[in-house]
Amino acid sequence: LKAVQDDAKRMDLPSWVTPAPSSLGTGGLGKLTADQWKAVCSINLVVTLVRIWGNADEKGRQYLMLSNFMDLVTAVKLGCKRVLELDTVRLYEEHMLRYLQGLTTIYAPYQLLPYQHLAMHFGENLQRFGPTHATRCFVYERENLRLQKTVTNQKFGK
């Protein structure tokens, strides 16, 4: 994580991007927000892992792990586009399938979790309901954070 922190210090992000916490990976940080997770996974880890593992042997474990992670990032980016074409949905399904297959081979004997199985059906939802920007959970994540910060003594009315 030191490499991720060092790379983050050298990054200039656009003002609309919520940066990853500078103390990422240290104790006492608390929970990351949805926007912070998005920055860590789609910006910070991509930059650092490509820098560290990008020139590794293509048959080696590190390169396979990088390719697997990039399939996940690509699938998420495609699934979150504001404008969707049928080809975009097909690309999402292709990258997600390759990511899940990679999990079971690179990290064998890994067993897929139910939410990972559901990710394979997300393409159907994109075809039926269109882009996710109107229904994604960032609003609810922020509300959960607000509720978690509410001081309560567990006594109604006091």
Image (cartoon, rainbow, N blue to C red):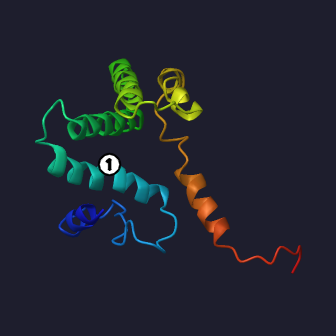
Residue found 29% across the figure and 64% down from its top:
15
Q: Residue furthest right?
A: 156
Q: Vertical placement of 3 versus 27: above or below? A: above
Counting the numbered discs, the total is 1
Secondary structure, mark 1, is helix
Q: Quadrant of residue 72?
A: top left
- Position of residue 37 measured from the top left corner of the image (x, y, whole percent): 42, 55
**In the picture, which quadrant includes the N terminus?**
bottom left
Residue found 17% across the figure and 51% down from its top:
52
Q: Residue furthest bottom?
A: 158
| Other-residue count near label 1 (Cα within 10 Å), few / some / many at <14 / 14–19 / ≥20 | some
- Position of residue 135 measured from the top left corner of the image (x, y, whole percent): 55, 40
- Position of residue 35 measured from the top left corner of the image (x, y, whole percent): 43, 57
Q: Is residue 14 visible?
A: no
Q: Is residue 116 visible?
A: yes
Q: Vertical placement of 124 versus 30: above or below? A: above
In this rendering, would 47 be left or right of 76?
left
In this rendering, would 82 be left or right of 154?
left
Q: Label 1 is placed on what type of residue?
A: Ser
**Camera-side residue of 104 and 69:** 104
Residue, disc 1:
42
- Position of residue 149 measured from the top left corner of the image (x, y, whole percent): 64, 72
In this rendering, would 5 be left or right of 56?
right
**Camera-side residue of 62 and 120:** 62
**Camera-side residue of 39 and 111:** 111
In this rendering, would 14 be left or right of 58?
right
Residue found 25% across the figure and 48% down from its top:
46
Residue found 45% across the figure and 30% down from its top:
109
